[in-house]
Image: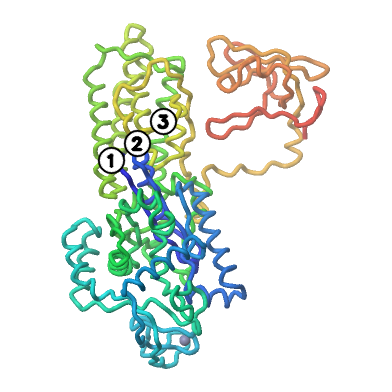
Amino acid sequence: MPTFYLTTPIYYVNARPHLGHAYTTIAADAMVRYRRLAGDDVRFLTGTDEHGDNIARAATAAGVSPQAYADEISATFREMWKSLGISNDDFIRTTEARHKKIVREVLQKLWDAGEIYLGTYGGHYCFGCERFYTEKEIVDGKCPDHQRPLEWIEEQNYFFKMSKYQDWLIGYIKDRPDLIQPGRYRNEILGFLRDPLQDLSISRPRTRLEWGIPLPFDDKYVTYVWFDALINYVSALGDLDSERTRRYWPHVRHMIGKDIVKPHAIYWPCMLKAAGLDVFRELRVTGYWTIEGQKMSKSLGNVVEPPAYTSKYGNDAFRYFLLREMVFGLDADFSDAAFRTRFNADLANDLGNLVSRVTTLIVNLAGGKVPAPDAVARPDDVSGLKAASERAAAETDRAMADFAFHRALAAIWEFIGAVNRYVDTTQPWALAKQPERRAELDTVLYALGESLRVLGVLLVPFVPEAATRIREGLGQPGAPRLSEVVWGRLAPGTPVAKIAGLFPRIEEKKEGPAASATTAPEPSHVSIADFRKVDLRVAEVIAAEPVPKSKKLLKLTVSLGAEQRTIVAGIAEHYAPADLVGKKVVVVANLEPAKLMGVESKGMLLAGSAGPVLGVLSPDRELPPGAKVS
Ligand SMILES: [Zn+2]
């Protein structure tokens, strides 16, 4: 069984989780879900990076301790991933004891091996900020915050002998074209390595910074934040010689944003080499999201937080958009209009309609059970659909090996398009009107059911909630497996339930983009006087039976206390007649009588519904039949 260990960056706790964090985490989640589907031994890690002077300063500004500050922000990340359905196996915090222990172990190991020495560190320092500024951060020789000149100060610090690994690192990267991807980041790093590599300062004096992990060999210093943070990928597995570390570490792959390539591609391999640990298998670098063409920033007020979309459209829709829209490794643009276009075109029209069409056809034309295909009827177009499913599966596999989520989705949507065209060309509803073509109809319905079953597996990494609903509707219990994507596995006789409302279309409203984000038009107001015209009553169901020749309707005999009457209700797909007898329900008593399938209905039963779920309204206390509801 192949082993696959994937990490996201650990997110710095100086900001709440936004679109950028969510994208990397969702992409990693899609990848591990795919590897699990393929049967790999998978481990998936995310977490938070919590030390350093930025956090110490932010905590001071907020008037809380650095630990309290880190606790609060770290919790928002953990909660966000939970609400987005992220399937991480572990969540590491760099303030946890298990992490600090391994950091100190690694430092001690390097110290004992002579890989670390005490030297002099010089830099541009602002006494107002109490921190060093890098050349890049300095504006006109001044502190960007205080607008006053920086001072060059020198202090004693510990250094890791990184320079001695320069030639080794260049050779290691050159020998492995796939180590850093996309290739332009590999080229950038090789370019950077043409200049002499400096030793890395790995400590800060505690007189300046308390908020870090003390060095095990000199507790007047704390560990530099990068040296601390990178080790999370190992420390989360346990002790360096633990069974879990031996099992997963040789297979580790890191997914990161492009702002942190240098520490991951230069410091980290040198640290691992010095500590006698395997270098990661690959470093996958993602691009940035712009928002409506602009950089996402607090000052522009355009920071996108996932709940703005997931609360209205669901996790799947948000995941789908991010994975489909960004070519992994390049920058992409997020806009409300693009989101809605993809939602309506790809999810509502293509996928949602297909799932609803096919399950409805099987329920209505085959009694809700997958019919047996006929080997002779329509062999050509069935084999075309089978081939399309195989192409989708093969291309998804190739794309996922490249972390090309957009290509995997394009391939799956090709297949969805082929199935939609198959419904249009075969016209099962027309075949159903010709009894002599029953074998053809059964063959078509089988092929459609089988196509949905395949989609219920292939879609798992990308829209996991929808994939589950598809498999449930098709009576496919248990954990899905990629090995089940073999045409013909769907057993005839499998019960099928209608799946409606998978991705309800986003209706455009006229007020403009900000106000147009609801999925259904708002009902207009009714006056109390109008509402009072509706006579709502508690009723008791005395008898219930199916209406002949109707799949949806039940004929109910209800008592309103003083009188009994007949009400026809469209709930046969959700309730067995026996479940209803004796039940107290709510009815509209003064509805105009109407004839439904030849039965006169005097009143209407109230029920709520959401997607495939329908529930009849019932008072939650004992009320006599005929009691008024208002
Ligand atoms: Zn300053």
Q: Nearer the viewer, residue 501 or 190?
A: 190
* Quadrant location, the N terminus: top left
**Chain-order first, disc 1 or disc 3:** 3
> What residue is drawn where x is 21% and y is 20%?
380
Q: What is the secondary structure assignment of the residue under circle 2?
A: helix
> For mark 2, what is the residue?
458
**Chain-order first, disc 1 or disc 2:** 1
Q: Give left or right: position of 383 versus 292.
A: left
User: Is label 3 or label 2 in front?
Assistant: 2
**Chain-order first, disc 3 or disc 2:** 3
Q: CA distance from mark 1 to mark 3?
A: 20 Å
Task: Specify how the rendered protein is coloured.
Answer: rainbow
Q: What is the secondary structure assignment of the residue under circle 1?
A: helix
Q: CA distance from mark 1 to mark 2?
A: 8 Å
Instruction: Give, as a three-letter code, the residue at label 2.
Output: Leu
> What residue is drawn where x is 56% and y is 35%?
610
